[in-house]
Image (spheres, helix red, strand yellow):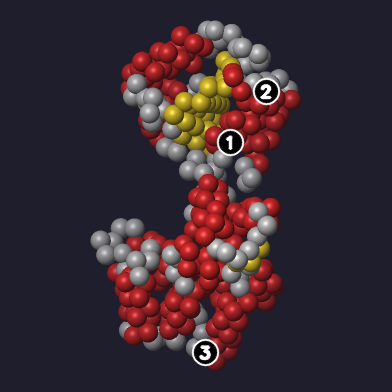
Amino acid sequence: MGQDPIVTALKDAITNKRIAHAYLFSGSRGTGKTSVARIFAKSVGTADDDVYEIDAASNRGIDDIRQIREHVSVLPFSSPFKVYIIDEVHMLSKDAWNALLKTLEEPPSHVIFILATTELDKVPDTIISRCQTFSFRKPSREILRTEILRVAKKEGAQLDAGAADLIALLGDGSFRDALGMLEKVLSTSKDKKLTREEVEAITGAPRAGLVNQFVESFIAKNADKALAAVNEAEKGGISMNVFVTLILEKLRFILLVQHSPASQSSVKERVSPDDWLFIEGEAKKKTSGAGLSPLMLAAILEAAEGIGRARIEALPLELAVVKVCG
């Protein structure tokens, strides 16, 4: 899902019988690299006993690669190809890279290598030049949310829009992390109809009420209440990255509703009924001259970029409050 150009290119390669002997899949965790490698192996007619999955994080030495070099010359058991999927390939040692390079330079006709990595910059150029490379993108929140709702329905559960959207956000662009979060929520909750509040309680995510307290106080330029919300989040051990992301999202929705009536329906679909009433109420304040301004949103955006670099996580957000409300 969300990797249409890659899927199309690999399908065409199989259809046109132009299968390469080495592929390099790069991208952040949980984007489908290993899954696509397994599907591709099956699609070219490779049986399970001719697919070899190797974790380079545990088998990174020259001896491990030499063992592969000895085995590649042996014909497949029952398939047209033997497929070697090497995960986390950037973890290989320098000697192991050199040994692998010799195999990639003159691969047997019955062998396909699929290398997967989360850190393409650590893969030598000599290896990259001998592979067909594909870059896997992070799935959008909308794609993650759709998948979460689909899986939840198959599991006999029902999530409201706010609950699915929060899990998608916590998944941070990873199908694996998002589905792991969903599994945790479904296994913990006794109710098959899940709300955003239950997801917040199970995952430890910031409460919508706390985010709303900050947003409302910030827009009203009430520094005391806005800083109190930041302090409560910090004391509760809430990730400031998650907290500020939820704040940014809510401010963005308010800004969209203020300036684009056409956006209202799409915003309404993504949030709980209570959240929609809050967003709509804050957006209406614009008519009285006390609403959200683009400069306010820009201040929080700047704070979000600074959180990763700050020794005290909450400080960039506190500075934004003082800057706007002071």
For marks 1 and 3 on the same chain, the one whose residue lies earlier in the sequence: 1
The residue carrying mark 2 is: 44
Q: Which residue is mark 3?
A: 289
Asked if residue 252 shows in the view, the reply is no
For mark 2, give the secondary structure: loop
Query: Is residue 269 placed above or below 107 in the rendered structure?
Result: below
Q: Amino acid at mark 1?
A: Ser
Indicate the position of residue 305 as horizontal and vertical percent values: 38, 61
Query: Mark 2 belongs to which amino acid?
Result: Val
The reply to whether the C-beta atoms of the residues labelled 2 and 1 are less than 8 Å apart is: no
Residue situated furthest right in the rendering: 15
Whole-Å distance between the Cαs marked 2 and 1?
15 Å
Please identify the quarter of the rendering in which residue 155 is found: bottom right
Q: Give the residue at mark 1.
A: 35
Quadrant for the N terminus, please: top right
Q: CA distance from mark 1 to mark 3?
A: 52 Å
